[in-house]
Amino acid sequence: MARSDAAARTLLTQFGIDEAPIDPWLIAEKLGVLVVPQDMPDDVSGMLMRRGDEQVIGVNQKHHKNRQRFTVAHELGHLKLHRGRPLILDTDTRVNFRDTVSSMATDREEMEANRFAAALLAPEAMVRRAAREAEFRTAKQLVPLMAKHFDMSEMAMNYRLINLGIIADPTLAP
């Protein structure tokens, strides 16, 4: 998984991004990737389509803005880390879908893209600094503060803080 973290750090460094919240739409634009909000089935968060030098991220416009941000970052992870899966069309196009199956993170590429998205939206150094500076007494208080600071859902931030070893699972706390 270090590959996902390194790829996210490289992008942030490449574009001189060192403050939260991170704007995945801006990063996509700087990479020449078109992000298109679309009506999609509820169980599909987004997709990445690549054809030659053209890349398009479709994002479910019905989803909450924080979920859309994570989806765009997730698809950027596929762009930077994975070749993509072929889709049978009249053209040579490769597509990655982010759906309920990918959200369960049972596929290696989906786990890597999820980790990339978390590292892009909440870079470890920024998270550690923000956690040191935050005023809180319990993990249950820290999670919403950090989620707001990084424009992420509380669930995504909870996982990020747990994965970085900053908190134990606050749902288990009294």
Image (tube, rainbow, N blue to C red):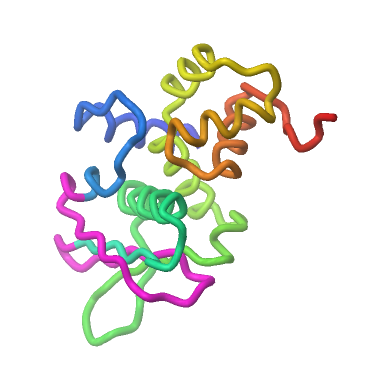
Q: Which residue is found at the position 43% from the left and 41% from the top? A: 116
- Residue at left offset 81%, top offset 30%: 173
Can you say which quadrant of the picture contains the C terminus? top right
Image x and y of residue 142, in percent: 61, 26
Vertical relation: 44 (above or below) 64: below
Whether 147 is drawn above or below 90: the answer is above
Chain part drawn in magenta: 29-54
Magenta residue check for 108: no
Q: How many marks?
A: 0
Q: Position of residue 118 (x, y in %)?
A: 47, 39
In this image, 17 relative to 42: left or right? left
Q: Tell which residue pokes out farthest to the bottom in this image.
A: 90
Image location of residue 1, percent across then percent down: 51, 37
Tell me if 116 is positioned left or right of 93 in this view.
right
Q: Quadrant of residue 137?
A: top right
Q: Farthest right residue? A: 174
Q: In the displayed structure, would residue 108 be above or below residue 39?
A: above
Image quadrant of residue 163? top right
Q: Residue furthest top?
A: 132
Looking at the image, which residue is at 37% across and 66% down? 61
Q: Tell whether position 47 is magenta.
A: yes
The residue at 25%/27% (across/down) is 13
Instruction: Residue 141 in the image: state x and y as whole percent.
Output: 65, 27
Left of 131 or right of it: where is 37?
Answer: left
Q: Which residue is more in the foreground, 5 or 140?
A: 140
